[in-house]
Image: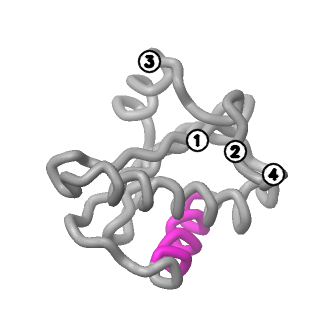
Amino acid sequence: MAKSLRKKETLTDKKSIDNLFIKGKVTQKFPIRAHYIPSEETKILFTVSKKKLSKAVDRNRVKRLLKEIFYNNHYNKQNKKFHIGFVYLSSKLITKKELLEIMKQVCLKIHQ
């Protein structure tokens, strides 16, 4: 069985998502913007704009890579708990290696 985020670890509640984007702090390293707010448990949201990447295949690929990178490198390695929303901003696909470096930098900023 593959390691991945479970349903209870993803941010799906509309009220929590609105609160995250309205009251949360923001950090950015192009092409990733992260909105985050402290909470009792870590919950994650990944979004890719349909305007930026029109093909669903590309949007799903980016979200899948972001989830994999976050889970393998940052999840359960921090002692602080946050609701985090990752927003992909670019209209071009980037490699997994580049995305990994950017996610490391963004996650370090969040946990400072």
The residue wearing badge 2 is 5
* Closer mark to the observer between disc 2 and disc 1: 2
Image spot of residue 43 (x, y percent): 63, 36
Q: Are marks 2 and 4 in contact (CB under 8 Å)?
A: no
| Separation of marks 2 and 4 at Cα, in angstroms | 17 Å
Q: Are marks 2 and 1 in contact (CB under 8 Å)?
A: yes
Instruction: Give the class, few, some or many, for how many residues have Cα within 10 Å of label 2's Cα (few <14, many ≥20).
Output: some
| Separation of marks 2 and 1 at Cα, in angstroms | 9 Å
The residue wearing badge 1 is 44
The residue wearing badge 4 is 79
56 relative to 106, above or below? above
What residue type is disc 2 on?
Leu
Q: Main secondary structure of the magenta part?
A: helix
* Closer mark to the observer between disc 2 and disc 4: 2
Residue 104 among magenta residues: yes
83 relative to 97, above or below? above
Taking the spot 69% from the left edge, 44% from the top edge, the residue there is 5
7 with respect to 105 (left or right): right
97 relative to 64, above or below? below
Taking the spot 44% from the left edge, 37% from the top edge, the residue there is 24
As drawn, the label of residue 14 is: 3
Instruction: Give the class, few, some or many, for how many residues have Cα within 10 Å of label 1's Cα (few <14, many ≥20).
Output: many
| Residue interval drawn in magenta | 99-110
Instruction: Give the class, few, some or many, for how many residues have Cα within 10 Å of label 4's Cα (few <14, many ≥20).
Output: few
User: Residue 55 sits in which quadrant?
Assistant: bottom left
User: Residue 61 sits in which quadrant?
Assistant: bottom left
What residue type is disc 3 on?
Lys
